[in-house]
Image (cartoon, rainbow, N blue to C red):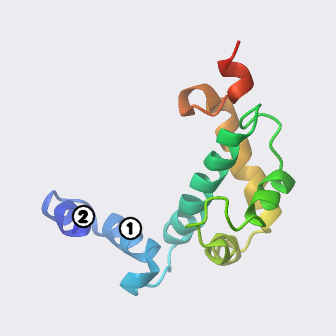
């Protein structure tokens, strides 16, 4: 298990707990701000990345509305638990739209290095 490997390599206890609390099936509560934040951004970051991959402009011009539109399509990134995405924002005490906007804004300046420039940029 990854947690055991990290522990053997001397990872700090708060890191191990944060990772464990991020996975509901391990039954570790999310108590610290770091634990709640990790849960709130991990899956959602992957989902936002997937949305960017299918948009001609990638992350550029993406809005919370465009992400929520894809959330309504069960076949898009079907393995993503939509309830957990909203739960993460709730546990942080932030509005879901604001949370989406924050993450989109965090990704945008790094679009090129993250491969989120979009197909329009790749074709030029």
The C terminus lies in quadrant: top right
In this view of the protein, which residue sits in the foreground, 55 or 115? 55
Nearer to us: label 1 or label 2: 2
Q: Is residue 3 above or below residue 101?
A: below
Q: Which of the two discs, 1 and 2, labels the residue nearer the N terminus?
A: 2
Asked whether 57 or 22 is in front, the reply is: 57
Residue 22's x, y, as percent? Answer: 46, 72
Crowd around label 1: few <14 · some 14–19 · many ≥20 (10 Å): some
Q: Which labelled disc corresponds to residue 105?
A: none
Residue that badge 2 annotates = 2
The local crowd at label 2, few if under 14, some if 14 to 19, many if 20 or more residues have their Cα within 10 Å, is: few
Label count reads: 2
x, y percent for residue 38:
51, 63
User: Which residue in the structure is indicated by mark 1?
Assistant: 19
Task: Name which residue lies at 66% across and 51% down.
Answer: 48
The residue depicted at 61 percent of the width and 75 percent of the height is 84
The picture quadrant where one finds residue 14 is bottom left
Q: Position of residue 98 (x, y in %)?
A: 80, 59
Q: Is residue 105 left or right of residue 29?
A: right
Question: What residue is shown at x 40% (from left), y 87% (from top)?
Answer: 27
Q: Quadrant of the N terminus?
A: bottom left
Q: Are marks 1 and 2 in contact (CB under 8 Å)?
A: yes
Farthest right residue in view? 65
Q: Please give left or right for residue 34 compared with residue 84 in the image.
A: left
For residue 37, what is the image quadrant?
bottom right
* C-alpha gap between disc 1 and disc 2: 10 Å
Q: Secondary structure under badge 1?
A: helix
Looking at the image, the residue that sits furthest to the front is: 75
Q: Secondary structure at mark 2?
A: helix
Which residue is at the far left? 8
Q: Residue furthest top?
A: 124
């Amino acid at each position: 298990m990854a947690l055991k490997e990290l522990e053997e390599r001397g990872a700090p206890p708060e890191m191990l707990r944060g990772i464990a609390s991020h996975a509901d099936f391990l039954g570790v509560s999310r108590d610290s701000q770091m634990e709640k934040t990790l849960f709130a951004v991990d899956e959602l970051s992957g989902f936002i990345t997937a949305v960017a991959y299918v948009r001609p402009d990638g992350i550029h011009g993406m809005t919370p509305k465009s992400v929520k539109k894809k959330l309504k399509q069960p076949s898009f990134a079907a393995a993503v638990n939509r309830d957990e995405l909203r739960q993460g924002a709730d546990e942080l005490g932030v509005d879901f739209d604001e949370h989406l906007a924050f993450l989109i804004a965090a990704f945008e300046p790094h679009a090129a290095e993250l491969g989120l420039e979009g197909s329009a940029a790749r074709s030029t």
